[in-house]
Amino acid sequence: MNKSLIIIFHGPPASGKTLLSRRLAHDLNLPLFSKDDLKEALFDALPNSAPNWTAQLGAACFQALFRQLETQLRAGVPAMITETAFWAEQSTAHFLDLKSRYRLEFLQFYCIAATDVLYQREQARRAQGERHACHTSAPALSAEEFKALVEGPRYARLPLESKVIDIDTNDLAHVDYMHLMRAAAFAVNR
């Protein structure tokens, strides 16, 4: 029996994860599971009056994300997963739990850019209204707060036994997309 594959897209906010993972999933005809997609749909469908409701919703969507992923694993279908905050402790435990129950391999794509570039993108998204309300309901962070968050352990690479491909997204127009395609296609077809 072949191993199942999970392709993990992650990194700090505004690093291009959504853009690149959606394109790659489309081009490789892979299912893409995104916590943001779940959170946005539920935010629109459910009443949201509690003060910390979006944080609770995000935690629930994280659990749902891994349930969806497990459905793919049971079927032996490769899948791609993207998330804004794969916190190393919590997420690694979830991925290792899946690996203990399924023959499983990981491929990580880690999007990185300079903190000031990420902050400018995040501010531009807020100003242009490009983000769904569930992501902008919290107050905007100052440049110092954003730097502490992005450069801290929250958005670190996951300590999984896997190949990790760093993607420099300082200039999204110059990302070597064909390199990503080849690496993902090779992993899917092994």
Image (spheres, rainbow, N blue to C red):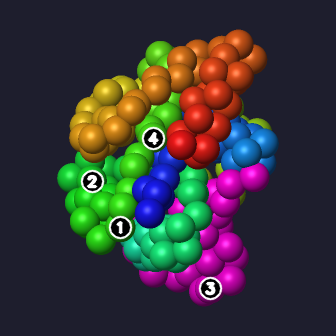
Q: Select label 1 or label 4 by which is in front.
A: 1
Q: Residue at x 36, y 61 (%)?
A: 103
Q: Is residue 124 above or below residue 103?
A: above
> 184 and 116: which one is in front?
184
Residue 185 in sight here: yes
Which one is earlier in the sequence, the residue at label 1 or at label 4?
Answer: 1
| Mark 2 → mark 1, Cα distance in angstroms | 15 Å
Please say if the residues under marks 1 and 4 sit with CB atoms less than 8 Å apart. no
Disc 2, SS: helix
For mark 1, does the 10 Å Cα neighbourhood hold few (<14), some (14 to 19), or many (20 or more) residues? some
Residue 107 tag number: 4
Q: Quadrant of the N terminus?
A: bottom left
> 83 and 69: which one is in front?
69
Residue 9 in sight here: no
| Mark 2 → mark 3, Cα distance in angstroms | 30 Å
Q: Select label 4 or label 2 by which is in front.
A: 4
For mark 2, does the 10 Å Cα neighbourhood hold few (<14), some (14 to 19), or many (20 or more) residues? some
| Mark 1 → mark 4, Cα distance in angstroms | 15 Å
The residue indicated by pointer 3 is 46
The residue indicated by pointer 1 is 102
Q: Select label 4 or label 3 by which is in front.
A: 4
Please say if the residues under marks 2 and 3 sit with CB atoms less than 8 Å apart. no
Q: Is residue 101 above or below residue 81?
A: below
Quadrant in the rendering for residue 101? bottom left
Q: Select label 2 or label 3 by which is in front.
A: 2
Which one is earlier in the sequence, the residue at label 2 or at label 1?
Answer: 2
- In the rendered structure, the answer to whether residue 117 lies left or right of residue 173 reads left
